[in-house]
Amino acid sequence: MLTKHKIKKSILEIKTGDITEEEAGAIVNAANRELSPGGGVSGAIHEASGPELWKECKKLGGCDTGEAKLTGGYKLKAKHVIHTVGPIYSGKTSDGTDLKNSYYNSLLLASRNNIKSIAFPSISTGVFSYPAGEASLIALKTIISFLEEHPEIELVKMVLFTERDYHTYKSSLEMILKE
Ligand code: AR6
């Protein structure tokens, strides 16, 4: 399943798929603060990339919530991995700010490293329990406003693991575009 939308000169795609198989300048990892492999999408990315990824991650000194760090992609089709740590959902207003920062800082890191295409999973909505509806609005609004200011990022893909998440993100995009 795939939806494409043009934001100024850039393309925003919403699709179903396994992010470890995406071709992109960078795929984003929904990491933990230690940048250790863990489970969920992070475990899958480390598995597909191979042990060199964890070796490089160990040298980075962890990552704070809302921040982002860059590594190689090793055995992945993507040249780089951008590791970001989303918030563990608590219901506080700071959750929204932290989630926004995860998307924003990942995009900024891509831009600063001349990466033109980037694929995101649905950060924080698995093990970290962020409700997907709320998270999708924050993710898409942050991506859209970034692309409006940064035409150097040519393509952003939201790669959703389930059809249910795909429909959630698609409905949120339609809602945002009507505003
Ligand atoms: N491709 C795309 N999306 C995926 C894939 C995949 N291969 N696998 C899972 N997802 P989660 P979080 C989706 O739990 O909530 C880890 O243990 C999944 O369906 O991976 O940010 C880390 O080490 C969900 O929609 O990330 C951290 O400790 C989304 O990815 C913690 O989990 C995010 O789910 C991070 O939790």
Image: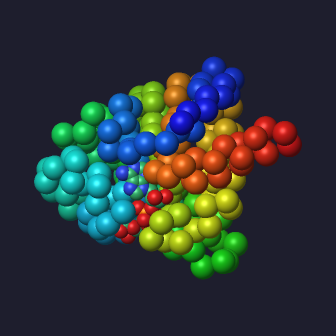
74, 151: nearer the viewer = 74
Give percent across and percent down for residue 38: 29, 67
- Asked if 55 appears above or below 1 in the picture, the reply is below
Residue at the spot 32% in from the left edge and 39% down from the top edge: 21
154 to the left or right of 95: left
Give percent across and percent down for residue 158: 53, 42
Query: Quadrant of residue 89 in the image?
Result: bottom right
Quarter of the image where the C terminus is located? top right
The answer, for residue 108, to whether it is visible in the render is no
Quarter holding ligand 1: bottom left
- Asked if 147 appears above or below 37 in the picture, the reply is above
58 to the left or right of 123: left
Colouring rule applied to residues: rainbow
Quarter of the image where the N terminus is located? top right
Query: Quadrant of residue 22 in the image?
Result: top left
Farthest-out residue, right: 179
55 to the left or right of 25: left
Residue at the spot 13% in from the left edge and 54% down from the top edge: 51
Residue at the spot 33% in from the left edge and 58% down from the top edge: 42
The answer, for residue 81, to whether it is visible in the render is yes
Give percent across and percent down for residue 159: 48, 43
Residue at the spot 71% in from the left edge and 48% down from the top edge: 172
Farthest-out residue, top: 9
Q: How many numbered marks, from 0 up?
A: 0
Query: Quadrant of residue 35 in the image?
Result: bottom left
